[in-house]
Image (cartoon, helix red, strand yellow):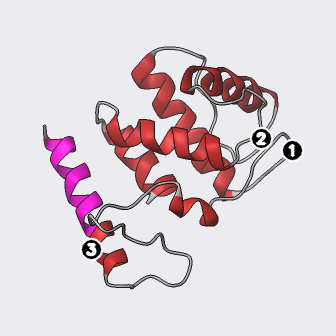
């Protein structure tokens, strides 16, 4: 229950900040009901694919690991090293299939949105909350 409350507080804080227009032009706008659409935040998340490197790949690898930890599928978990290599490609395709998006190994708008929706409503652990916070806020 502690992590669910933390997730609710983080989501409420993000919604409040975005509703006030704080955070720059790349921030996701609040909807009329005060919620923030994960799809509207997609502009800040880059497309990733085999050969990509860097911080966003690390975030994606952490997202994949959080999914694998909760769902106990598409294993083994990944080294969070920022290198979108063979293991990350295999895990991405597996989880894309589970999330109901095209399993092409390319992390684009639909894949990010499906993962963020999953992380938002997944049973909360510190790993899931951290993954959502880094990739989806």
> Residue 111 placed where, x, y %?
62, 40
Q: Look at the image and give the residue range highlighted in magenta.
A: 2-13
Residue 35, by quadrant, is bottom left
Tell me if mark 1 has few (under 14), some (14-19) or many (20+) residues whose alpha carbon lies within 10 angstroms of its own: few
**Above or below — where is 98 with respect to 41?**
above
Kindly check if marks 2 and 1 are in contact, taking CB atoms under 8 A apart as contact. Answer: yes
Which residue is at the front of the view, 110 or 52?
Answer: 110
Could you say which disc has been placed on residue 78 in the image? none
Q: CA distance from mark 2 to mark 1?
A: 5 Å
Tell me if mark 3 has few (under 14), some (14-19) or many (20+) residues whose alpha carbon lies within 10 angstroms of its own: some
> Residue 39 placed where, x, y %?
53, 54
> Which mark is first along the chain, 3 or 1?
3
- Seen at 75% across and 48% down, the residue is 48
> Residue 75 placed where, x, y %?
59, 16
Kindly check if marks 2 and 3 are in contact, taking CB atoms under 8 A apart as contact. Answer: no
Kindly check if marks 1 and 3 are in contact, taking CB atoms under 8 A apart as contact. Answer: no
Q: CA distance from mark 1 to mark 3?
A: 37 Å
- Seen at 53% across and 39% down, the residue is 114
Residue 99, by quadrant, is top right
Question: Which residue has dot 3 on it?
Answer: 16
Which residue is at the front of the view, 116 or 130?
Answer: 116
- Residue 9 lies in the magenta stretch: yes
Query: Is 130 on the left or on the right of 84, as rendered?
Result: left
Q: Secondary structure at mark 2?
A: loop
> Residue 43 placed where, x, y %?
63, 65
Spot the residue most to the front: 32
Question: Which residue has dot 1 on it?
Answer: 51
Could you say which disc has been placed on residue 84 in the image? 2
- Seen at 45% across and 46% down, the residue is 131
Tell me if mark 2 has few (under 14), some (14-19) or many (20+) residues whose alpha carbon lies within 10 angstroms of its own: many
């Amino acid at each position: 229950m502690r992590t669910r409350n933390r997730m609710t507080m983080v989501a409420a804080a993000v919604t409040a900040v975005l509703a006030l227009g704080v955070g720059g032009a790349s921030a996701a706008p609040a909807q009329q009901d005060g919620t923030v659409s994960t799809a509207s935040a997609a502009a800040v998340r880059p497309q990733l694919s085999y050969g990509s490197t860097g911080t966003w790949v690390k975030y994606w690898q952490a997202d994949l690991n959080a999914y694998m930890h909760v769902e106990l599928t598409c294993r083994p978990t990944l080294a969070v090293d920022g290198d979108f290599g063979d293991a990350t490609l295999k895990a991405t395709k597996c989880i894309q299939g589970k999330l109901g998006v095209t399993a092409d190994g390319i992390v684009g708008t639909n894949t990010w949105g499906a993962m963020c929706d999953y992380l938002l409503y997944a049973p909360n652990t510190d790993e899931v909350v951290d993954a959502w916070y880094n990739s989806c806020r």
